[in-house]
Amino acid sequence: MTLGFHNTGGSAVRSGTVTFGTHIIGALGVDWGTVESTEELPTPIGPGLRKEKTWTVCVEEWRVPLGMHVETRDVDVRWK
């Protein structure tokens, strides 16, 4: 999962987290559950600057039975 972060504020972003919501999807499209994983933001991000970061988002194989798949649908960012 690759995300770009653009600081449009007047001061640097010094810390923060990004949380991914990875959904377990059944063969018929039913959403069976969500697994969250949280990572640190690529800080600092100065005012007016942009940073990009790539993460590998994993789910334990026992959570994804045969015939199901995963989709990372939700991203939540918190910063200071």
Image (cartoon, rainbow, N blue to C red):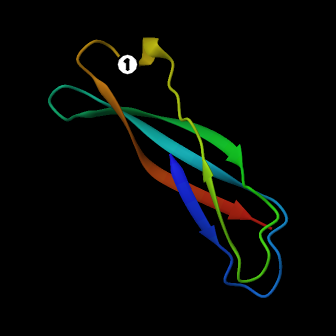
Q: Would you say 53 lies left or right of 46 here?
A: left
Disc 1 crowd rating (10 Å Cα; few below 14, some 14-19, many 20+) is: some
Q: Position of residue 32 (x, y in %)?
A: 32, 30
Residue occupying the point 50% across, 45% down:
1
Please say if 55 is above or below 16. Answer: above
Question: SS at mark 1?
Answer: loop
Kindly indicate the quadrant of the structure image that contains residue 55: top right
The percent coordinates of residue 43 (x first, y second) are 79, 60
The image quadrant that residue 78 belongs to is bottom right
According to the picture, the residue beneath numbered tag 1 turns out to be: 64
Quarter holding the C terminus?
A: bottom right
Q: Left of 28 or right of it: where is 8?
A: right
Depth order, front residue of 42/74: 42
Name the residue rendered at 62%, 67% in the picture: 5
Residue occupying image coordinates x 55% and y 57%: 3
**Looking at the image, how many numbered discs can be counted on the residues?**
1
Between 66 and 4, the one nearer to me in the picture: 4
From the top left corner, tell me how far across and down residue 44 is, in percent: 82, 64
Name the spot of residue 73 as percent of width and height, x first.
40, 48
What residue is rendered at 32% in x and 13% in y?
65
Q: Is residue 33 left or right of residue 78?
A: left
Q: Residue furthest bottom?
A: 10
Q: Is residue 10 above or below residue 4?
A: below
24 sits left or right of 21 in the view? left
Callout 1 amino acid: Val
Residue 18 to residue 80: above or below = above
